[in-house]
Image: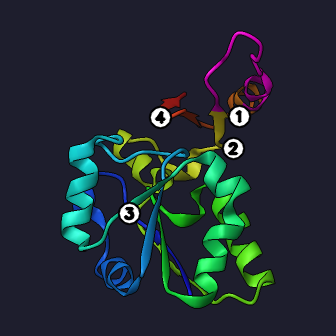
Amino acid sequence: MLYIIGLGLGDEQDITLKGLEAVKKCHKVYMEAYTSLLSFGLSTNGISNLEKLYGKPIILADREMVEEKAHEILAQAHHDHVGFLVVGDPFGATTHTDLVVRAKKMGIDVKIVHNASVMNAIGICGLQLYRYGETVSIPFFTETWRPDSFYEKIQRNRLMGLHTLCLLGYYLLSAL
């Protein structure tokens, strides 16, 4: 059984009761650590707080592990209960959908535990959620990679009189 468990947006205490029950059933628990971070980041103290509350060791899963070694996580889920912790809601990133699809193709049962995400928490800024256009991700630039595809989406939203939620790496910004 593979549990994909949303953690919410703040710290270890934002997990739902249903999520905590699922974690306690798991033999191994992974924390996806690249699409988003909890408020404490990846600090040793923050991870140990998760482990104390959840009563389990937490294995950090970086991009390589999740995208290229998913078969190892799924192989474990074929025989044991495996938890996969996600900041926010499990379906806030396509990576998590891909993991579910792979699991189902392998005949592995999957249970999803939803939680709050940046997509609904953005309402705190006072802008109407129904007035948002397409959300865009603005990745960190490197010396050799400077994508600009997000610009056209922001411009298109603006022309339609819509707000744009821009996801900036581990931070967010709402642009009018």
Q: CA distance from mark 3 to mark 4?
A: 17 Å
Residue 48's x, y, as percent? 23, 55
Q: CA distance from mark 3 to mark 1?
A: 30 Å
Q: CA distance from mark 2 to mark 1?
A: 7 Å
Residue 10 or residue 24, whichever sits in front? 24
Front of the two marks 1 and 4: 4
Q: Quadrant of residue 75?
A: bottom right
User: Which residue position holds label 4?
Assistant: 172
Q: Quadrant of the N terminus?
A: bottom right
User: Which residue position holds label 3?
Assistant: 7
Residue 88's x, y, as percent? 44, 57
Kind of residue indicated by mark 1: Asn
Q: Residue at x 77, y 21 (%)?
A: 148
Q: Residue at x 25, y 64 (%)?
A: 51
Front of the two marks 3 and 1: 3
User: Which residue position holds label 1?
Assistant: 157
Judging from the image, what secondary structure is the residue with disc 1 in? Answer: helix
Determine contact: label 2, label 1, CB under 8 Å: yes
Q: Residue at x 81, y 82 (%)?
A: 105
Kind of residue indicated by mark 3: Leu
